[in-house]
Amino acid sequence: CVLEVFLSLLALVGSSGMFPEKPKRSALNQLTRLLLRKYNCGVRPVQNWTKPTTIYIDLIIKSVLDVDGQTQKVTTSIWYRQIWNDEFLVWDPEEFDGITEISLSSDAIWVPDVIISEFVDVGKSPVIPYVYVNCSGTVKNYKPIQVVSACHLEIYAFPFDKQNCTLTFRSWLHSVNEVDLALWRPAEEIANDTREFMNDGEWELLSVPSHYWTLNLENRDYAQIQFNVLIRRRPLLYVVSLLIPSIFFMVVDVTSFYLPPNSGTRITFKTSILLGFTVIRVNLMDEIPATAIKTPLIGVFFAVCMALLVLSLAMSIFVVKLLHYSEKEIKEMSMSACLLDKYGSMDQSFIESAFTSMKTLDDMEQSGGRRENTIYLYNRVLYFEISYWVELCLKVDKLLFCVYLLIMLIYVMTLLLLWGVWSSA
């Protein structure tokens, strides 16, 4: 009787709500516990072990962050998607309140060991710890990745260069009989998908073609999908800041040959041009990519431009030096100057008259002629000699100018030829 009374009191208390009922687990909680209760994340999720697991891959290029020509590395930001079927993660939505898709921790389930073969460094990628799983067992692993990959960069035509960098996805351990790869979208759609690319930077995305192939290693075939990221540099910034100023300097240097060599300003002007070109070249040195194997054509352009400026300055110094010989040196070199005159603007009669005048001057001094006449005749002969020497120096200056123009023409034609060879390659 006492036991019956005690039980009745407990029933009365329970019915009055003094002891709350234990809450039921949610359908999502129950489904998660059911799926992961006996799940082994180290086993490939297939019922028949001879059946390969197909990993579908999708790729969207978001931006090109950095292109390092010296270390041959490219940093890109991509949106990467992996889709595969897990035969152990299947349920009936009607038994779990109509749940058709849930998120699970990527550490709790099997994830394929698909890597990028060109991967060389750890990028600043955000950690996404979850994957989506639907009721049919389809697993979706979506994540943004910052990829630092090795790339064979061709910077010979900088800043008009195009780059072809590859991203090759493959399973690190599983052969094609265990893990196979396939594209989630058609290859044409992936190649022309540039809508998400940040198109305001230095690089322009042309296309992302892809192809599937197998690699044979140690008598085992490994599935691979290679994406070719084709990008092109926008050259406007480098043309405005590098090429146009250099061309202006060369044009001004050519026109400076029209300055009279005996005015004394040509050397100063050409020195200023060389100094200005050197300052611009040093300030913009970091803008030109460098490699240990091949020098960009623009680097050769700058080096030859500086060599031409130095040659132009040396030519002007040589002409000015010829113009400033002393009177004694002019007298001693008058006969050699006449022999070097290839243009024949002064005839032989002038040379004979100059030496005849010199002989007359000596005769007058010996015969006791007036000293004023002697000085006058001496100055006149010296004036003829100086005038002839100046005219000869001007002809030498003109000849050096023609040689300079010829060298520059050969240089420009060589650059155009190299550019044409590169464009047709």
Image (cartoon, rainbow, N blue to C red):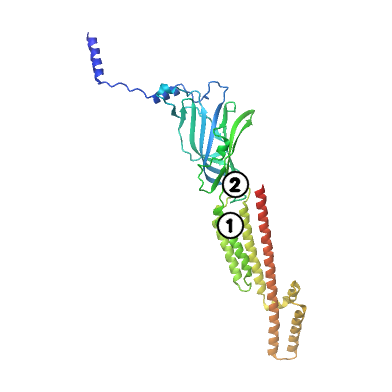
The residue wearing badge 2 is 162
Q: Residue 65 vs residue 16: left or right? A: right
**Near-viewer residue (216 or 29):** 29
The x, y position of residue 227, in whole percent, is 58, 38
Rendered position, 343 above or below 144: below
Q: Give the residue type at disc 1.
A: Leu
Name the residue at 61% across, 65% down. 253
Q: CA distance from mark 2 to mark 1?
A: 19 Å
* Residue placed most toward the observer, 411 or 340: 411
* Residue 241 place in picture, x, y as percent: 55, 56
Q: Look at the image and tell me whether residue 333 can be seen.
A: yes
Secondary structure at badge 1 equals helix
Q: Are marks 2 and 1 in contact (CB under 8 Å)?
A: no
- 323 on left or right of 124: right
Which image quadrant for residue 354? bottom right
Q: Residue shown at 69%/84% (left/top)? A: 380
Task: Give percent across and percent down for residue 240.
Answer: 55, 56
SS at mark 2?
strand
Q: Which residue is mark 1?
A: 243
Name the amino acid, label 2. Lys
Query: Which residue corresponds to the image point at 46% horizontal and 28% vertical from the top-left?
Result: 133
